[in-house]
């Protein structure tokens, strides 16, 4: 089979979103080193880490493959000023999840700058305005207070608990519905 004969699904285009300070773009192979460094460190504890390089590779492949299988996924977040990858933010619904989630992971050294909130707002606007979703959750492990603060800044409210077979208990934060958001709109992905 030549490239011209490849099924159209192999050419899935992942949209690029832009905010004032960030670019949310497709995961790429050259993201692996920063991805592996994040998953090797203690900051990954709340999202299934620490992981070996081999398992980090599988996680990066899963993030890219999620787009192919579900038609949505998480973006690598770059700081516009430096072009540096600062995290992974977006829409996630693997097998075993209770419903579609908006998740955020910031790479080491990039926390505390508002990047998670800014990127999550863009991802949520995409889910509501482009995909037409009417509800969205974020799952936060009980001791992950930094992520709980991001959820609160996004206007989320607590909505119970979910117990995952591998990740254990997680708090469910429910995002405001599209019509409840005063700042929703298309500007995030212009």
Image (tube, rainbow, N blue to C red):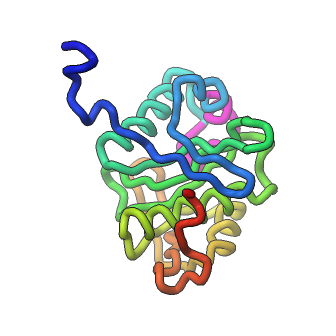
Task: Judge left or right: residue 69 versus residue 103.
Answer: left
Q: Is residue 124 above or below residue 24?
A: below
- Can you give x and y, in whole percent of width and height, for residue 173 in the image? 53, 72
What quarter of the picture does the N terminus occupy? top left
Q: What stretch of residues is rendered in magenta?
A: 36-49
What residue occupies the far bottom of the structure in this picture?
180
Q: Is residue 45 magenta?
A: yes
Name the image quarter holding the C terminus: bottom right
Residue at figure coordinates x 44%, y 64% from the top left: 127
Q: Is residue 94 magenta?
A: no
Viewed as shown, does residue 123 lie left or right of 150?
A: left
> Residue 126 location in percent, x, y?
48, 62
Q: Residue at x 47, y 68 (%)?
A: 137
**Outermost residue, top side:** 2
**Residue 51 image point, x, y percent:** 56, 31
Residue 104, placed above or below residue 131: above
Query: How would you classify the magenta stretch by its main secondary structure?
Result: helix
Viewed as shown, does residue 19 lie left or right of 161?
Answer: right
Quadrant of residue 52 within the rendered picture: top right
Spot occupied by residue 175 in the image (x, y as percentages of width and height): 52, 75
Residue 182 or 102: which is nearer the viewer?
182
Q: Residue at x 33, y 40 (%)?
A: 68
Answer with the quarter of the image where residue 143 lies. bottom right
In this orientation, does residue 139 appear?
yes
């Amino acid at each position: 089979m030549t490239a011209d004969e490849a099924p159209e699904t192999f050419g899935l285009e992942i949209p690029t979103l832009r905010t004032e300070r960030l670019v949310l773009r497709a995961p790429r192979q050259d993201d692996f080193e920063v991805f592996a460094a994040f998953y090797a460190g203690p900051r990954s504890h709340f999202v299934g880490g620490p992981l070996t390089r081999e398992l980090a590779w599988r996680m990066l492949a899963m993030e890219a493959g999620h787009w192919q299988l579900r038609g949505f996924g998480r973006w690598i977040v770059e700081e516009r000023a430096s072009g540096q990858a600062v995290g992974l933010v977006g829409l996630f619904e693997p097998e075993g999840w209770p419903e579609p989630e908006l998740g955020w992971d910031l790479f080491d050294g990039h926390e505390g700058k508002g990047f998670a909130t800014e990127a999550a707002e863009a991802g949520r606007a995409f889910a509501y305005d482009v995909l037409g979703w009417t509800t969205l959750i974020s799952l936060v492990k009980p001791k992950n207070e930094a992520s709980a603060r991001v959820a609160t800044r996004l206007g989320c409210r607590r909505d119970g608990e979910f117990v995952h077979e591998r990740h254990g208990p997680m708090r469910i934060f429910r995002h405001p519905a599209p019509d409840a958001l005063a700042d929703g709109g298309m500007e995030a992905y212009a």
